[in-house]
Amino acid sequence: MIRLTLWTFSLLTSFLMAGPIIVIDPGHGGANHKHKTDGSQKGHGSSWNNAYAATGGHLEKNLALEYSQEIAKALAASPRAQKLGAKAILTRTADTPISAMGRAAIAVENTARIFLSLHFNGSSSHTAEGTRGYVCSKDHPHWEYMHFLNPYIDRDRAFSDKVIKSVATALQPFGGDPSKAKTIGDSKTDGGHLKDGIRTLGFARQDTHLYQAVIMLLEVEFIDNPKISNWLLGPETRVKARQAVAAAIVTAICDHLENDTPPTAPRKAKNAN
Ligand SMILES: [Zn+2]
């Protein structure tokens, strides 16, 4: 009886002490199927690859996986993260396709405290630069299939700002410009960017009424810009830049977790449908 009670107690304690789960989502993955696009609702809402590096032949999908694995490694090794009991789960660990809904579902199933989708950017002019954070705006006026409010927009935006500043500052010694980093929302009144990968955030946000995760999409830099690609992906700097970004993200995550008190009771967004 005593043993059972102790066992029950320890089980209860381990449940209560379970640390925050950080779901890291490496964008894209898998082979090229033309019907899969991020820019429409066709396919699975997640394309195999978007941005192509200007140098070195790198694909966004592979860099996203490399960086995500580096973040998971850095989180596991971080004394601060260990103290918090934070653990990383990746939505994919190989070059495999996964739908936007599937990515969101992993965050939901694991009751993630933070869902961070990781991407690299490209622009039509191939000259854009800067770290970008994307968040679900308070409202989604032009997403007819996702009518909901994000009651956590202020918190999500603060987290995104923290992450992009931390990442851009970490990249400054390599050639980055922190003044070009910014957070953008997805409603017209909030930056108005219906961007690749935001669908994943939308699905996750729609489901996370149940547990109020912090959700953001990070575009580390514009890899199609030769100027950026040269210092971000050059043979001398590639690994160091990746490690610097991973450390910066872990710092931002720990800063957030140490100061954030998650809501204790699940709550539904007012106009969720
Ligand atoms: Zn992408």
Image (cartoon, rainbow, N blue to C red):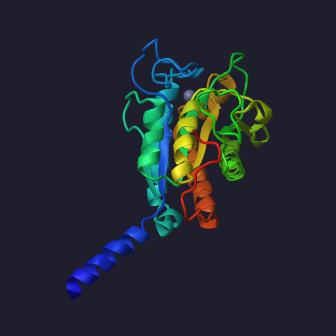
Answer left or right for 29 relative to 156. left
Answer left or right for 226 relative to 118. right
The residue furthest top is 34
Q: Nearer the viewer, residue 105 or 69?
A: 105
Q: Nearer the viewer, residue 191 or 222?
A: 191
Q: Position of residue 108 (x, y in %)?
A: 46, 47
Q: Quadrant of the N terminus?
A: bottom left
The residue at 45%/52% (across/down) is 88
Is residue 242 visible to the viewer in this orientation of the structure?
Answer: no
The residue at 57%/18% (across/down) is 40
The residue at 58%/36% (across/down) is 202
Answer left or right for 136 relative to 82. right
| Count of all numbered marks drawn on residues in the image | 0
Q: Position of residue 45 (x, y in %)?
A: 50, 25
Q: Is residue 83 above or below residue 132?
A: below
Q: Position of residue 172 (x, y in %)?
A: 70, 43
Q: Is residue 273 above or below residue 263?
A: above
Q: Nearer the viewer, residue 178 or 237?
A: 178
Q: Is residue 13 above or below residue 43?
A: below
Quadrant of picture, ligand 1: top right
Q: Nearer the viewer, residue 24 or 224?
A: 24
Is residue 126 visible to the viewer in this orientation of the structure?
Answer: yes
Q: Position of residue 182 (x, y in %)?
A: 74, 39
Q: Quadrant of the C terminus?
A: top right
The residue furthest bottom is 2
